[in-house]
Amino acid sequence: MFDTKDDRKKMEEVLERFRGELKKVRTGRAHPDMLGAVKVEAYGQWMPLNQVANVTISDATMLLVTPFDPSTIANIESAIRADSTLGLNPSDDGRVVRVPIPPLTEERRKEIVKTTSGKVEEAKIAIRNIREDARKDIKSTEDLPEDAKKRAEKEVDEMTKEFTDLIDQEFKTKEAEIMKI
């Protein structure tokens, strides 16, 4: 019998990575993960924002970024402003960086959905690549009878369908969240 546990684990990792990417997508509401991709120059090197500051939600339209070291506040503000995919305009008061989340226009919402659908396709391609690798492994296993190979291939195909359906479901949920005014 061919073991597909490793392939399932790889597909689960792709799904988790995709979910992580979706968390970074702007929806018009403040969410700390929106700033997850921001890198800040601190102490002579580039670091993720969450390693130099604490990101919290003030209300539905405001993020508060509290630096662990107040001397990094200017770098944090400029790093958030420099990330053009976010389109945010932070301001600091010497202690915290306030990041107002402006309401999204209909055009910007559609643009975000389009970019997100690109991430969907990347995740599906990764799932299909895992399927192809599994099929190659199945075919190259010589001590496996033909009917067992067919069953293993069918199992891998079902797993692929299951995970692509989960990706589509996650995307539809996120799309509805983005388009909601």
Image: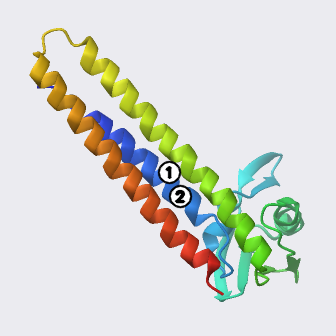
Tell me, yes or no, whether the two marked residues, 1 and 2, touch with CB atoms within 8 Å. yes
Q: Residue 17 carries which label?
A: 1
Q: Which residue is drawn at 72% across and 75% down?
A: 66
Left/right of residue 20 with respect to residue 72 in the rendered view: left
Left/right of residue 119 with respect to residue 67 in the rendered view: left
Label 1's element? Answer: helix
Q: Residue at x 77, y 67 (%)?
A: 69
Name the image quarter holding residue 33: bottom right
From the image, tell me which residue sits under label 2.
Answer: 20
Q: Quadrant of the C terminus?
A: bottom right
Label 2's element? Answer: helix
Q: Residue at x 18, y 8 (%)?
A: 142
Name the image quarter holding residue 86: bottom right
Query: Exactly how many numbered labels are in the figure?
Result: 2
Instruction: Specify the amino acid type for callout 2.
Output: Gly
Q: How far apart are marks 1 and 2 (CA)?
A: 5 Å
Work out whether residue 104 or residue 84 is closer to the camera in this orientation and state it: 104
Work out whether residue 175 or residue 49 is closer to the camera in this orientation and state it: 175
Q: Which residue is drawn at 17% across and 26% down?
A: 150
